[in-house]
């Protein structure tokens, strides 16, 4: 058992989640590598110091460059805005340091391609933070699809809907200013990743995006509040994806439905410890969806709790992610989702944007 110094760029929402995860992952999963919270970097030296004191890091960094270059920082977690991802990742990878980067991977398709290339050249562990697909319930759903429990898949519907921008009186802010901060750049990556994980590669899209509130406080909104896309998968399955940040009543609407020739599966992240399964078996009068509560029999549940139905939470998804990152570093073998997956998701988003502008189907192979 050996320790590894972790440096986290960003100490806010996701920076704190990653700090908690790396503090706990050794105890939860008995990992061979034991993380040491070595250094944190915020938006200023003062904020870095606040994060250091609050989260238990050994040191605060004056800037991200110092964090990446520090010899005691052996792996880097990027939890800062997507416009910063490329520069930080390339600097860390050039020094041979493994990188875990929050989604989306960079601000553009060019960013993610550069990051994939740099990771391949460095030959070190790299991962993207698609945490929601790691719940025990979604891992189990993925397993059931692969095992043919619902037969051949015929349809997929997915959504990622929230209401944090539903109030039209909210002022304009950084979320309304750039293309990357819109719903296609912010919420869509998680559900596109889920669709790819559950069904397989997406080969073409027909998309439409729009701003629901076109101005906020007299300031023009420069990106999309909601978007939808029809999709075709490589397997021939058809599907529909919808994303919104103005969907009243939804707090974490990461939802999917998978229909097959023998049944169907439903999942809702707001009830993350359950998966609903329908099997076309038995008398019609006795058929219906049944709710399966996750427990020790499901993937990655037992390390957290021995009681069925007691449940796991949001931070536990990040702990599973930290375990996977450490495993990739330890074994030298890629652990999904690597930067390559982040880039594939970005290709779907680029095709969706082109489809919205041209009002035509777009092949992913062109991006």
Image (cartoon, rainbow, N blue to C red):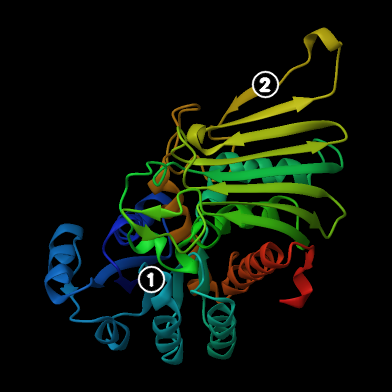
Question: In the image, is residue 49 above or below residue 247?
Answer: below
Looking at the image, residue 123 sits to the left or right of residue 157; the answer is left
Number of dots carrying numbers: 2
Q: Residue at x 38, y 48 (%)?
A: 315
Residue 57 lies, with reference to residue 92, above or below; the image says: above
Q: Whole-percent x and y of residue 230?
A: 75, 52
Question: Please, is residue 335 above or below residue 72 in the view?
Answer: above
> Disc 1 marks which residue?
77
Residue 22 position within the rendered picture, expressed as x and y whole percent measured from the top left: 34, 60
Q: Quadrant of the C terminus?
A: bottom right
Residue at the (70%, 45%) spot, across then down: 143
> Is residue 327 shown to the viewer in this render?
no
Disc number for residue 290: 2
Q: Earlier in the sequence, mark 1 or mark 2?
A: 1
Residue at figure coordinates x 62%, y 57% from the top left: 193
Q: 287 or 168: which is nearer to us?
A: 168
**SS class, disc 1:** strand
In the rendered image, the quadrant that contains the N terminus is bottom left
């Amino acid at each position: 058992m050996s320790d590894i110094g972790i440096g986290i760029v960003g100490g806010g929402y996701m920076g704190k989640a990653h700090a908690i995860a790396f503090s706990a992952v050794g105890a939860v999963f008995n990992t061979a590598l034991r993380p040491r919270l070595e250094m944190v970097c915020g938006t200023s030296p003062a904020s870095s110091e606040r994060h250091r004191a609050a989260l238990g890091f050994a040191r605060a960094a004056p800037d991200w460059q110092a964090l990446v270059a520090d010899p005691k920082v052996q792996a880097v977690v990027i939890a800062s805005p997507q416009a910063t991802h490329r520069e930080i990742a390339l600097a860390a990878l050039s020094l041979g340091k493994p990188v875990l980067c929050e989604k989306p991977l960079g601000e553009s398709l060019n960013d993610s391609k550069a990051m994939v290339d740099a990771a391949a050249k460095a030959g070190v562990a790299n991962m993207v933070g698609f945490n929601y697909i790691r719940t025990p319930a979604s891992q189990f759903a993925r397993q059931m699809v692969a095992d043919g429990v619902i037969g051949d898949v015929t349809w997929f519907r997915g959504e990622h809907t929230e209401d944090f921008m539903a109030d039209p009186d909210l002022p304009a802010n950084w979320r309304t200013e750039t293309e990357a901060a819109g719903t296609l750049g912010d919420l869509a990556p998680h559900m596109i990743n889920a669709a790819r994980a559950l069904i397989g590669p997406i080969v073409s899209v027909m998309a439409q995006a729009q701003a629901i509130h076109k101005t906020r406080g007299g300031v023009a909104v420069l990106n999309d509040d909601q978007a939808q896309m029809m999709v075709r998968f490589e397997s021939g399955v058809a599907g529909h994806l919808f994303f919104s940040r103005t969907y009243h009543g939804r707090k974490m609407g990461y939802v999917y439905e998978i229909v097959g020739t023998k049944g169907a599966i439903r999942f809702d992240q707001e009830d993350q410890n359950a998966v609903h399964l329908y099997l076309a078996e038995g008398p019609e009068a006795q058929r219906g969806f049944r709710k399966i509560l996750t427990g020790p029999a499901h993937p990655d549940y037992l390390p957290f709790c021995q009681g069925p139905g007691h449940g796991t939470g949001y931070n536990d998804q990040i702990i599973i992610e930290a375990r996977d990152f450490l495993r990739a570093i330890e074994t030298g073998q890629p652990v999904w989702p690597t930067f390559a997956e982040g880039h594939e998701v970005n290709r779907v988003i680029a095709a969706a944007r082109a489809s919205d502008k041209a009002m035509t189907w777009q092949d992913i192979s062109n991006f």
